[in-house]
Amino acid sequence: MAYLYLLCMYYFIWTTRTNASLSTIGNVYYNMSYNSTDTIITSLTVKYQVVCAAQCANLFVNCNTAVFDSLAIPQCSLYSGRITPANLTVSINAIVYDFQQSKIPTTPILHGWNKTGITVAGASNGSAGTAPNLLSNPYGTALGSFNSLYIADFANNRIQRWLINGSNDTTMAGLSNATAGASSVALNIPVSVVLDSNDNMYFTDRNNHRVVYWANGASSGTTIAGITGTSGFTNNTFNWPCAITRDSSTGTLYIADTYNHRIMKYFANASSGTVVAGGNGAGTGITQLYYPYGFTFDSSSNSLLIANYHTNNIVRWVLGASSWTLVIGSPTGLSGSTSTLLNQPVGIALDSMSNIYVADSKNHRIQFFVAGQSNGTTAAGVTGSSGISPSQLNSPYWVIIDNQLNLYVSDHNNNRVQFFSHH
């Protein structure tokens, strides 16, 4: 009898319901019918296990075993084999995952991107400038409402808003003529921008050592963290802050205090923050960070995934912990261009399945890592080859994904943002 093993699972629900919608592997259906035992699984562990099984089925035509290792730090070990999975339906709060062998495609249905990028902001030929249709070393990006893309136009000292597929942008913060400054209307090397539900902006103004709040449509901003023009190591100062994320439910900000080698947490309206990762000087030790440029929050494990630029790795720091665990790359700082190594990672993104995307800047590529795996594949760019062609990147610094898993890549040294469609 063909079967699918889900090790470490405490609850199995085997059903033979005729009213269950059949789907391709990994598709999700909402179904008001429950299994015959009327059991609703709410265990977070089981939810992770089902996602793990879905990943296995999506990656391998003959998915043999999916092993879920940990809840605190989810790890999913995937195996392929000659054993064919049986029909297995697991119901979780009326969400039905259907693993039916007859529906398994001959090729994976996830994790593929068009290798030819499309320029959605800036000049496709790499020209830099201050004109409305140009960028200069774009850095952090964020997707806004009405099909818009917000870009930290790094060397132009401004935040730009592009309508995707448009030909010009609008300056939303900073001076449109790219003049640097330290006032409420001027910026000095903005790096990362996040938006709330009303497209109000929160961004790091790196060389002013501050975080700025700029309401949608406003003509000036307000410093909400840090002291304008003053670097420091206290709980209310920064030294070249870079990445920023925001918890939309609480308004809490997490800020990469990059040159202090730490991540800071600021509650809404707080005048000072607390260290939640690093803060023990630069180094390769498990209590240290080394120029953390990019990071993202992983709500599934209440942790931060941090891109350690100088040590060429991605580490996980659970909030409240005193040290990190290695996720991707070398624990000693070794750089490389293989599928398991990185070279000066900057930006990092996470999708709804906990898969990781890394802007591997000096390898000129975007690397994709299935959740729990440290062996990646190149989703965009050509490893070790910088260039201006549609298939190449030149020091990509940032990557974000939309709800269709399309990639938006800040092609930093090509002065453009590239779009790579998911298929």
Image: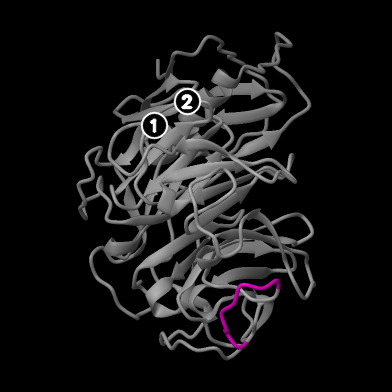
Percent x, y of residue 66: 40, 25
Q: State the residue position of label 1.
A: 324
Q: Which residues are magenta?
A: 177-184
Most foreground residue, 320 or 179? 179
Percent x, y of residue 11: 56, 10
Q: Amino acid at mark 1?
A: Trp
SS of the residue at dot 1? loop
Q: How is the image coloured?
A: one colour
> Residue 82 in magenta?
no
Percent x, y of residue 131: 57, 91
Q: Main secondary structure of the magenta part?
A: loop
Left or right side of 284 for 417: right
Question: Label 2: few (<14), some or many (≥20) within 10 Å?
Answer: few
Q: Amino acid at mark 2?
A: Ala
Q: Can see residue 6?
A: yes
Percent x, y of residue 377: 32, 51
- Which residue appears at 42% of the width and 35% of the height? 316
Rendered image: mark on residue 321: 2
